[in-house]
Image: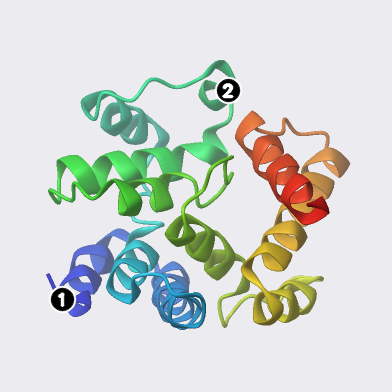
Amino acid sequence: MEIKEYEKIIRPRLKDARFKHSKNVAKEAARLAKKYGADVRKAEIAGILHDITKETPEKEQLEIIKRAGIELTELEAGSPKLWHAISGSGYIKVELGIDDEDILNAVRYHTTARGGMSLLEKVIFIADFTSEERDYSGVEKIRKAADKSLEAAMLEGLSFSIEDLAHRRLAISVDTLNAYNEVITQKRK
């Protein structure tokens, strides 16, 4: 399918702002993929689809997760904010027939990251943080890091997430901590 066809699929599922964000993530993912040598087409697909279930009711998200045969960890089960990434991965596999593991994982881990991320997964994680419409405090620092290296951007993005979650007294996914520790360890080598 072409990117325009995926846009037609997500359009009725998302409000205007989220649709615009998804298009911007696809655009930024393509730019980062070109810069760092990832598959541009896969980056655009994962970027446009990453939030496909973001505005889906929680009950329906849980049904999608179950239909896709995905088992939630205890932390995931108790963290509805993480469900859209997991249900999104399940949805594009079951409903859209996408079976490319790299695209599925890029969607699933675009919120938490994880240890052992592929190049595409990193591209989507950073593209979601730095898409054109993002204007939170700290976005420019992550954008500058993304122009230096993907690892620098990962470190900034993961640090931002961990600090934000800790400040708000929210659970931090083991996947996020594993990704952070991996980036730190590789940086020291």
Q: Report the residue that reaches farthest toward the right.
A: 167
Q: Secondary structure at mark 2?
A: loop
Q: Residue at x 15, y 76 (%)?
A: 2
Which image quarter: residue 182?
top right
Sequence-first disc among 2 and 1: 1
Camera-nearest label, 2 or 1: 1
Which residue position holds label 1?
Answer: 2
Does the CB distance between marks 2 and 1 fall below 8 Å? no
Q: Is residue 169 left or right of residue 90?
A: right
Residue 63 image offset from top left, x and y in percent: 28, 27
Q: Secondary structure at mark 1?
A: loop
- Colour basis: rainbow
Pointer 2: residues within 10 angstroms few (<14), some, or many (20+)?
few
- For residue 141, above or below residue 180: below
Pointer 1: residues within 10 angstroms few (<14), some, or many (20+)?
few
Q: Residue at x 73, y 72 (%)?
A: 142
Along the viewing direction, whichever of 122 and 57 lies nearer the viewer: 122
Along the viewing direction, whichever of 108 and 146 lies nearer the viewer: 146
Image quadrant occupied by the N terminus: bottom left
Residue type indicated by callout 2:
Gly
Residue 131 image offset from top left, x and y in percent: 56, 76
The disc placed on residue 78 is 2
Residue 156 image offset from top left, x and y in percent: 76, 62
